[in-house]
Image: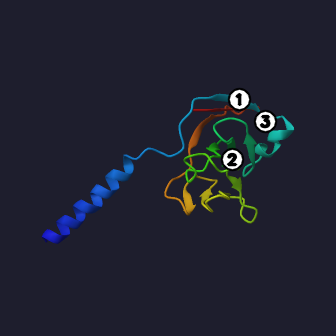
Amino acid sequence: MKIRIFLLILVLAGVSCKKNRTHPVPSIAFDITIDMTLPTYQDLNSVGGWAYVAGGIKGILVYRQSTDVFVAWERMSPEDPDNVCATGLTPDSTNFLELYDPCSNARFSMYDGSPIANSSWGLRKYQTLWGGSNTLRIYN
C-alpha cells in the first residue's frame, strides 16, 4: 500500500512539473488581417485549405478546419527553441495534415497542433477571428 501511494505521488509530481514548464516558442504580440480574396490566400476559401502568412517568428500557417473555423500555427518548431533551423515547419509532402520540422524530424498535426513524433510539445497557436466576410484576423 505504501509503495502505491509513493508511486502515485511521483506520477502526480511529474505531471504537475510538466504543466509549469514554459513553452519553448516565445509568445510575441502581433495583429494581422488578411484579405482572403487575394490569390495568395485562395486555398483558404475551402475546408482543408491552408496558406502561409507573414508574421509571428518564422511565419504563420493558417488552416481551415471547417466552414467557420480557422487555426493559425507558428512555423517555428518547439524543437528549435534557439531558432537556429533555417526553415520553418512545412506541410509533409506525403500527408498534408502533418507539419514537418526538417531539422529535428519532429511532426505535428496541422489540424490541432499536437505532437505526432519527436516532440513533447504542441505547436504555438495564434488566435483567429473570422466573421464570414473576406477578411481573417490573426493575432496574439
- In this rendering, position of residue 71 left or right of residue 44: left
Q: Is residue 73 visible?
A: yes
Q: Quadrant of the C terminus?
A: top right
Mark 2: which secondary structure?
strand
Mark 3: which secondary structure?
loop
Mark 1, mark 3: which one is toward the viewer? 1
Mark 1: which secondary structure?
strand
Sequence-wise, which precedes: disc 1 or disc 2? 1
Could you tell me if the residues under marks 1 and 3 are in contact, i.e. CB atoms within 8 Å? no
**How would you rate the neighbour count of disc 1 (Cα within 10 Å): few for under 14, some for 14-19, many for 20 or more?**
some
Residue at the (74%, 32%) spot, across then down: 34
Could you tell me if the residues under marks 1 and 2 are in contact, i.e. CB atoms within 8 Å? no
Residue 103, quarter of the rendered image: bottom right
Residue 52, quarter of the rendered image: top right
Q: Amino acid at mark 3?
A: Met
Between the residue at mark 1 and the residue at mark 2, the CA separation in whole angstroms equals 15 Å
Residue linked to disc 3: 36
- In this rendering, position of residue 112 left or right of residue 16: right
